[in-house]
Image (tube, rainbow, N blue to C red):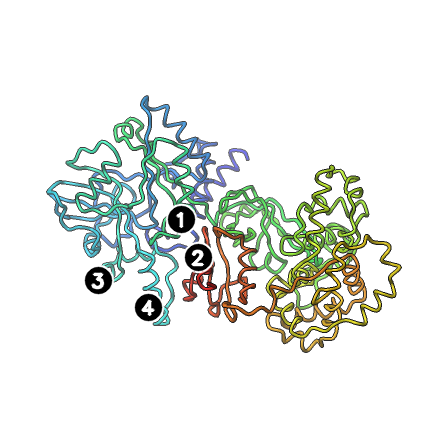
Amino acid sequence: MNEQEAKKRIDLLKKKIKQLNYDYFVLDKSTVNESVRDSLKKELVELEKSYPKLITTDSPTQRVGSALSGKFKKIKHTTTKKSLSDVFSAEEIVSWHERIKKLVSDKIEFICEPKLDGLNITIHYNKGVFTKAITRGNGIEGEDVTHSAKTIEAIPLKLNEPIDLEISGEIFLPKKQFERINKEQKSKDQKLYANVRNLAAGAIRQLDPKIASERGLDVNFYEIGANSMDPGTQKDVLESFRKLGLPVEPNFHKTASIDDVVNFCKKWEKKRDSLPYEIDGIVIKVNNLSQQKKMGKTAKTPRYAVAYKFPAEQVTSKVLDIILQVGRTGAVTPVAVMKPTLVAGSVVSRATLHNEDEINKKDIRIGDTVILQKAGDVIPEVVESMKDLRTGKEKRFRFPNNCPVCDKPIERKEGFAAYRCENQSCPAKQKEEFSHFVSKKGFNIDGLGEKVVVQLLDSGLIQDFADVFLLKKIDLLNLELFKDKRADNMIISLKEASHIPIERFIFSLGIRLLGETSSYDFANYILNHKKKSEKHLEKIEKESDELTLFEEPENKSDQQKEDFSILDLIETVQSIKFEELENIDGVGEKVAAYIFEWFNDPANTELLEKFYKVGITLDTSNVGRTGKLTGRSFVITGTLKDMTRDQAKDFIKHNGGKVLSSVSKDLNYLVVGENAGSKLKKAEELGVKVINEEDLYKITA
């Protein structure tokens, strides 16, 4: 990027950020997620660092907040308000420490304080008596909101000591109050409020103080301005506030170790949902006020403090290209190649665009600045393009006529969103099919990753799924990736995987639209209508010579004793009429069509028979069970303490419960672990009962 291009980009960014700032600070309205605004501002800061000649006094990076609304009397701040520099990673925290320790000779201690998501407020006391409350405004002057701030019970009208004091803090809305207000809105059929910050800000900046009093607002204080006290440290400031009767965030932490600072940030990143109010990061300050004074401030920010922002679920990035990926069912999916961007704790360089309709609907073009979203384990996706940042050089994407891998024609059938490659020999499809087959939710074969699958296919050692279980040690040793020990481990993994839960076996087959939950529902139906197979068993016995092609399965005796074999599975499913399939709970018409087609294809019947011959046996212990969770449905989110999610799912199924993938009003329980994301919020909105791992154990005790 040259200077001329940088200037155009800077001008676009300044215009957009100013508009978002006005919406946020003046109108108390969020047109985008706050992290999107942060992301754009970060890009602007980086460009201005690279091209300092392009910095102008009206840049959003050069001042705090935005214009005043004009509703209230303007009051000049006694102490100018500065905004903090944001940091987004442990590396940036360490870099900040490296810079500031050069400014003072003594050892540095730090105070870490959870950063509340609310509205900044400055309160003045004269001889201990509350006199006025001012919003931050543009940092130099703010708006007089004394009338509404007085209604907040947490703000004392008289301090415990008769001193003069100017303090700053954060007005916020507790989660319970937010839920109460939205419940009232819902009962009146009125629009729900989007977030706690906007609701708090809107309440405090109403002309009628009664609105603020009804909201149930709260406040925590953290900064001292002009005063008649003489504190030596930030810790002294917070403790003095408490003695005066002023509330502070109780989880502040003093430390002399920057590593401890990083660990504190990571700890609260995981624990943030346990607090009764929203926090969006950690404020890190130098504890010693004399050291703060020596470090000083820039025109924009103090050097002695930074705000660590928790990993954002939404940021902005640039679409460098759009490429196509071919999945196991032949679906051709467009993928945006992004400028590498940190989102939700990981660097993302690709994001799904789903299909042609989605690209057209969102009008995503190569070269666009877009909002990128990633929540928890969800695959990154492009939410929308920021059209007002376009330069005119952006390019529309057109789907090609041929598969990008095998060059065979692709087509989009009427009524379907995706283009498909119907070439059964397409290398991309084969690779994805085998990867799905051996995945954790399928056969879960340890050590059989994508690179190994590709080598096995390229070498001709495997042609279908069942061939995986015919592999011998000598076959593996001929592959580049294998040595003696790894080959032994792979053979052990194959033997362990040969006895598989029936629902995972069905899922592993890769039948189109048949997911993890519907595979379980289908397996449950099968076992309630099971038939013993004589026809297929006779066929296998007549083909006994063919068995000499394979190693005698070690678990053949178990196979003969098993309650329900793969041959029984073939017999049962092929006896079910299509009308019955589409009425199975959790299946439906489209999935039923794919199941019917798959199980009645002679090639697939041969594959299933081959599975039987090589010794694959089915475990039916988890399906159709009754227990203390029978009739109850569960969704799992976050990281559990004692179990993986898959283990938790098996535990629920083993006790008769049903595991679903999404939250709805009909769900019975949401099981939450650490870092629970959007599913928790949705469950709370819908009134779904939320439990933790220990509660789950208690229900089954």
Q: Residue at x 77, y 46 (%)?
A: 456
Location of residue 524 in the rendering, given as x and y in whole percent from the top left corner: 62, 69
> Separation of disc 2 and disc 4 at Cα?
32 Å
In front: label 1 or label 2 = 2
Location of residue 329 in the rendering, given as x and y in whole percent from the top left corner: 70, 59
Tag 1: residue type?
A: Lys
Query: Mark number for residue 666?
Result: none
> Separation of disc 2 and disc 3 at Cα?
43 Å
Residue where numbered disc 1 is placed:
271
Tag 3: residue type?
A: Lys
Quarter of the figure that contains the N terminus = top right
Taking the view exactly as shown, the residue that stands out farthest to the right is 545
Label 1 Cα neighbours within 10 Å, binned few <14 / some 14-19 / many ≥20: few
Q: Residue at x 79, y 72 (%)?
A: 534
> Separation of disc 3 and disc 4 at Cα?
17 Å
Query: Mark number for residue 184?
Result: 4
Label 2 Cα neighbours within 10 Å, binned few <14 / some 14-19 / many ≥20: few
> Separation of disc 1 and disc 2 at Cα?
17 Å
Q: Is 133 drawn above or below residue 104 in the view shown? A: below
Are discs 3 and 4 less than 8 Å apart at CB? Answer: no
Tag 4: residue type?
A: Glu
Residue where numbered disc 2 is placed:
694
Query: Mark number for residue 210?
Result: 3
Location of residue 635 in the rendering, given as x and y in whole percent from the top left corner: 50, 61
Tag 2: residue type?
A: Glu
Residue 486: quarter of image: top right
